[in-house]
Image: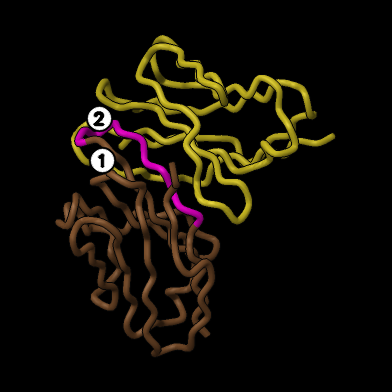
Amino acid sequence: DAKTTQPTSMDCAEGRAANLPCNHSTISGNEYVYWYRQIHSQGPQYIIHGLKNNETNEMASLIITEDRKSSTLILPHATLRDTAVYYCIVRVAIRYSTLTFGKGTMLLVSP
Amino acid sequence: EAGVTQFPSHSVIEKGQTVTLRCDPISGHDNLYWYRRVMGKEIKFLLHFVKESKQDESGMPNNRFLAERTGGTYSTLKVQPAELEDSGVYFCASSPAKTGTDTQYFGPGTRLTVL
């Protein structure tokens, strides 16, 4: 699986949009971009995933650049409960592929 | 729909003892995964079941770890004998589909402390 690079930490004010970047310059054509987050003492929580088109769900939006070498996870109105470590994971789209977690980005949402 | 459940939530044992962790996947999910995070490290894959069969156990650290999924429902992960370096949080995840892009849903984890 392609390697990802994320900032170690980010801050965001409550109510503002949180934009979390991820670089995956070696991504292959058959690899998806997944985002998970881990709130303190909980298991990883799935957020969203995409291949090349932008995606949106009730939790977040995923913007993937046209060359697919980077992406941004957007939490449109961050709340204190969004404070967590966010993981950007590139996962090959074959039958039975596992998740490779990196260090992620620690997002701190402040009042 | 109930999520992935894990038992116990915490376990404290002494070095050399045996511990068994249990995972109940989401009902109907054929795929079951075990991961773990040891102190200061990243979350690492351990193994993957498809129903009752081990599809991939490349992440199992050594033969002190034994995973089973009899009947293709719940799974157990036994550590025998436990060592200090086995301390960490063990996560279970499940997914429904038979393709590589299905989403994995994680349980809350079992925190294992070996003294």
Tell me which amino acid carries mark 2.
Ala
* Residue A57 is covered by the magenta coloring: no
The vertical placement of A27 against B6, above or below, is above
On what subunit does the disc labeled 1 rest?
A
Magenta highlight on residue B103:
yes
Q: Residue at x 53, y 65 (%)?
A: B39
**Dot 2 lies on which element?**
loop
Which of the image's four quarters has the N terminus of chain B? top left
Q: What number is the disc on residue A93?
A: 2
* Crowd rating for badge 1 (residues with CA inside 10 Å; few <14, some 14–19, many 20+): some
Horizontal and vertical percent position of residue B46: 31, 59
The secondary structure that most of the magenta stretch takes on is loop
Q: According to the image, label 1 marks what residue?
A: A97
Which percent across, then down, holds residue A77?
A: 71, 22
Residue A68 position (above or below residue A84): above
Q: Is residue A50 left or right of residue A22?
A: left
Tint of chain A: yellow
Q: Residues within 10 Å of mark 2 (few under 14, many from 20)?
A: some
Q: Observer-nearest residue: B4 or A13?
A: B4
Position of B71 relative to B3 (above/below): below
Answer whether labels 1 and 2 touch (C-beta < 8 Å). yes
Disc 1, SS: loop
Which segment is the magenta one?
B98-108
Image colour assigned to chain B: brown
- CA separation, marks 1 and 2? 7 Å
